[in-house]
Each structure stands twice: as structure tokens, then as C-alpha cells.
Amino acid sequence: MQHTPQGQLYTDIVLEVFKLGGLLISDGDQLSKDIGLTSARWKVLGALANSGTPMTVSQIAFSMGQTRQGVQRLSDAMVKAKLLAYEENPRHKTAKLVALTEKGSDAFAALEQKQIPWANAKSSGIELKEMEVALEVLKKITQVLRD
């Protein structure tokens, strides 16, 4: 069996996204190193900061496209590091809410100050329209995989 032209292009996109993911993790680890974090911890802080409200581990995992177990391990370590705190969940007896602490909020703010110039520099030379199309395609692929 052979790929359709569309199937082959989709496969090529997936492989490129895998490479891109590795490169982004490497850059993220470098950006967050001075703050004592990793890309993985940064993603958890970002999920919570962007939601503006405490979330369950499952909700964080879904928003990040990660496994619940992986996010649980990260959350437990980040609670020990006082970046996050567990709170009672009025909607569920056992699924605690995960909230940013002041230390976690400060760390995320510091990371944003590093990320902004990084993003501005890395995006120079790529047309705005190209990035808009890329974002839309990636969102569609994400939705297809979630469905």
C-alpha cells in the first residue's frame, strides 16, 4: 500500500513537527535553565497561567497534549518546589485542583520576559501570513488527533 499524495505530505508534516518539538524543548530548556526549570515544568506553569484559574491534572494534561501520569509527576515535584499548590476541588473528591503559587507566578513572569525576545528573534524572516497558515494547519491536525 502507498500513501496518497495528501497522506505522504501529512506524514512529512508529522516528521517535521517531531523534529521541531525536539528543538523547541532544547531551546526551552536553555531559556528556563537560569530560573531552575525545564521546558516540561514551563509548560505546566504556562497551562495554569494561561487558564487564569486552577485546573485538575487531567485538564492540564489535555491542554498540553501530554499524559495525565506525566503531568502528575511534574505537578508533584513542582508542589514540593513550592511552584504549585494542591487545592480542594468542590466538583470532585479525589481530583485536586492545581494552582500557581506566588513563586510559580513569579517564575512564569520571568520566563515570559525571556521568551518574548526569543520569539521575536526566531520569527524574524518568516512572513506573518505564513505563520498564520501554519498555525491554522497545526490546529486542524491537533483537532483531528483529538477527535
Image (cartoon, rainbow, N blue to C red):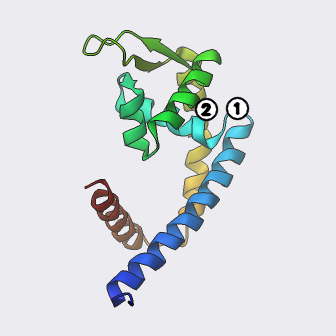
Quadrant of the image occupied by residue 51: top left
Where residue 138 sits in the image (x, y, percent)?
Answer: 37, 64
- Residue shown at 67% from the left, 39% from the top: 32
- Residue shown at 41% from the left, 84% from the top: 8
Report the residue that reaches farthest toward the front: 1
Where residue 45 sits in the image (x, y, percent)?
Answer: 51, 31
Which mark, residue 63?
none
Q: Residues within 10 Å of mark 2 (few under 14, many from 20)?
A: some
Which mark, residue 35?
1
Q: Are marks 1 and 2 in contact (CB under 8 Å)?
A: yes
Residue type at numbered disc 2: Ala
Between circles 1 and 2, the one closer to the viewer is 1
Residue tagged 2? 110
Of the 4 image quadrants, the one containing the N terminus is bottom left
Residues at marks 1 and 2, CA–CA distance in whole angstroms = 8 Å
Circle 2 SS class: helix
Where residue 113 sits in the image (x, y, percent)?
Answer: 59, 38
